[in-house]
Each structure stands twice: as structure tokens, then as C-alpha cells.
Amino acid sequence: MRFIQADWVYPVSSAPIENGVVVLNDEGKIEDVLSRQASENLGDKIEKHSGILCPGFVNTHCHLELSHLKGKLSEKKGLPQFVKEILAGRESDSTTIQLAMKAADREMYSNGINLVGDISNLTDSIVTKTESQIQYYTFIELFDILSTKTKQAFEEGVRLRKKFTEAGLACSLVPHAPYTVTPELFAKINDDIFSSLSTLSIHNQETVSENMFFTDQAGKMFEVMSKVNPDLLSHPPKAESALKYILTFLNSFSKLLLVHNTYTTVDDIKYVLESRKSIYWTICANANLYIEDKLPPIDLLDSMGAKLTIGTDSYASNWSLSVLDELKAIQNAFPEISLEKLIRWATYNGAEALRQTDKFGSLDKGKSPGILLLSLMDNTDLKSGFKSVKRLA
Ligand SMILES: [Zn+2]
């Protein structure tokens, strides 16, 4: 049994406790969370730390498969250029790919991450995931671009799902982005989730030309995609925004993660909130700074009551795979957002979106969410900003 105490305990599911104690049993499960008074008779059994105890982090957006692209892609050139470079540089020998994934997985674990929602286009990540100390939920990502490719893309997804499922890994089939998935493929994915009650994920409004694709049938993204699919010129998709377009197709999910949201508007947020669907907004702040050098309207999303989660995205578009680095980037741009909120986004909200709150996301009896010690620039001042994270369990 361990009795771990810090200046503050943030269970997330309940109010922070000053000088609280987390009791861990020998199996690593939380036995209890005690107030300072209730732990007074424990004496020197208590491990004392300076800082904040919180549950292990949940990273709701990563692409483990792209880990070998660390440091290889240009920064701040915009999404269309980024996609071009990924397609050109993705191929590598399988040893390099496997070693890079292992290293990224170990790095995430030591950075305090216990649960990851990971996008996969291939089966490359299965070995790393089954051997990991991290629990993974895999989003098998589909795109077709041309409706003549729909059947093949969906069948390939079903084949990959079988491989992941056979390896004991939870997964679901998800669409890549509004501009790479045909209405036919959207319909197939939507029908599929109706029977499996799963979490969906889609890249949303990552670049300004993504909205223009649907509102004006013009812009850089429309130009690029209509070269691959000339049908777009005669039958262009029309909608008030990329996000509204997505939601005309997807309606049977149990949870949906919208990833990036860099160019999401007040009107979009209102539309989503009024739909009363279980939709989460995944913020990948450093990836947005890496690719587009622009952050999503995080303050607006928060003030309107949207549920936020945190993603690191992949090593193709980030300098580290660290949820704490993401929180620091958000704090840097939006210093008024409270510590309590940031910790909730990085833990409980992600676990809820991935439907894993029975084990992860909060310090509650019976869970084994991982236990982190967060240090602040000044541990006596909760507004002083995050400094570092250390895994205690
Ligand atoms: Zn992504």
C-alpha cells in the first residue's frame, strides 16, 4: 500500500483537496482519496511531494505510425504543403518505423500519458500497442476521394479492424477529413457505427481553405482536390462550413471527436452545442503552431460550454509528444484559463470521449488511471504556470 501526498490533489471528479492523500493498493488501484485530517494518523507511511497530484493524461489524437517523421517536415508552411510532404516522406524501412514507434510510445508514457486515441492507416502499430504500458484506442482512418474507390477503402478498413481486434485492441472505423471522404464513404461509416456504438474522430477545419472548399468551391484545398477528382468541378459539395457538412452525414455515433478546429466559428460551435450530441473538441495546440502557426478559438469554445480534450498529434507535426507541453502552449496564449479546467481537458474529458472512465481520467476508488506529480513554476501559486510532470504510478 502507498500513501501519496502533495500540496494539492486534483481528483478531477471532485473538488481539489489541499494536502490530500491518494491511497494506492498493491495492484496499483486507488483504494481511497483522503483529506489531510483523515490521513493525520498515518505518520511516516506517507510519501510527501511538492506540487499537484492528478490522474494520468489522456492523449486523444496521435498518429503513432508517423513517429519516424520526427523533425523531417517543414514548419509553418500551411496544411496543403504539409500533406504533400507527408505523402512524399511517409515511406521508410520497417525497422526504422518500428523503432520510432517504440520510442514515441515510451516517451508518451514517461511524459505521463496513460491512454491514447491513435489514428492508424496501416497495421504497423499493432506490436507497439500490444506491448505498451499505455492503453490505446485505435481510430482506423478511411478516405477515398473518388467514389469509385469507396468500396475498396471501406473493405480495407474492415480488414484492418479485424487485425486490431484479433490483437485485443479496441478500435473503430473513422473518416479522415471532410474533403477526402465522399458522401458514399461517409454513409458507409455512419451505418457501420450504428451497429457498433463506437467513438468517432475526424480532422476538422484545420486550414482556412477547408471551409472555402464547401462555401465557395474554391481555394487551395479545392484546387488540389479537384485535380485528383475532376468530378468536384461539375458536382461540388456545398455547405455553410466544413463542420456543418460533416454533421449532415454523421449522426449515429455515440461520441465524436472533432480534431484541430483551428478555423471553427461561433456559428459552428452554436450549431454543435444545439445538436445536443456527444461531441468533443480536440485541441492539438503545438501541431497547429507547427503547421499553420495559428491556434483554435480555445477561449471561445470554453466560454460557450464546449467539451475540450487534448491531443499531441504526431511527430510529423510536433516537437514532443507531451500533453503537458500542449497545456503549456494553451496557458501561454490563454493565461486566464484555470489550472483545474486544463487538467480536466487533459484527463477526464479524454477518458470520457474514449469511453474509458471505468479505469482512467480521475482519481477515484477502484481506478488505475496513473498518478502524476505536476510541478508549477511556483508551487505555492496555482496561477504561476506548469513547469514539469513526473510519473509516480
Ligand atoms: Zn491528425
Image: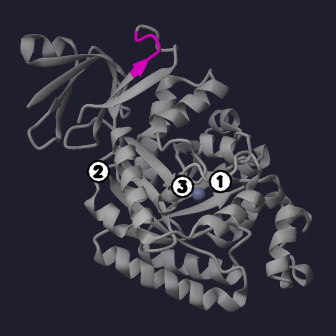
Pointers 3 and 1 in contact (C-beta within 8 Å)? no
Alpha-carbon span between mark 3 and mark 2 = 18 Å
Q: Position of residue 270 (x, y in %)?
A: 72, 47
Q: Residue at x 81, y 53 (%)?
A: 208
Binning the other alpha carbons within 10 Å of mark 2 as few (below 14), some (14 to 19) or many (20 upward) gives some
Alpha-carbon span between mark 3 and mark 1 = 34 Å
Q: Which residue is mark 3?
A: 278
Q: Which residue is mark 2?
A: 358
Residue 335 visible to the viewer: yes
Pointers 3 and 2 in contact (C-beta within 8 Å)? no
Look at the image and give the residue range highlighted in magenta: 375-379
Which quarter of the figure has residue 180? Answer: bottom right
Ligand 1, what quadrant?
bottom right
Q: Amino acid at mark 3?
A: Ser
Is 246 drawn above or below residue 384 in the view shown?
A: below
Predominant SS of the magenta segment: loop
Q: Is tag 3's residue or tag 1's residue first in the polypeptide sequence? A: 1
SS class, disc 2? loop
Q: Position of residue 126 (x, y in %)?
A: 35, 69
Quadrant (top left/top right/bottom left/bottom right) for the N terminus? top left
Q: Position of residue 113 (x, y in %)?
A: 38, 43
SS class, disc 3? loop
Q: Position of residue 51 (x, y in %)?
A: 35, 17
Q: Which residue is mark 1?
A: 73
377 on left or right of 151: left
368 on left or right of 163: left
Q: Residue at x 29, y 56 (%)?
A: 132
Q: Residue at x 52, y 72 (%)?
A: 121
Q: Is residue 381 magenta?
A: no
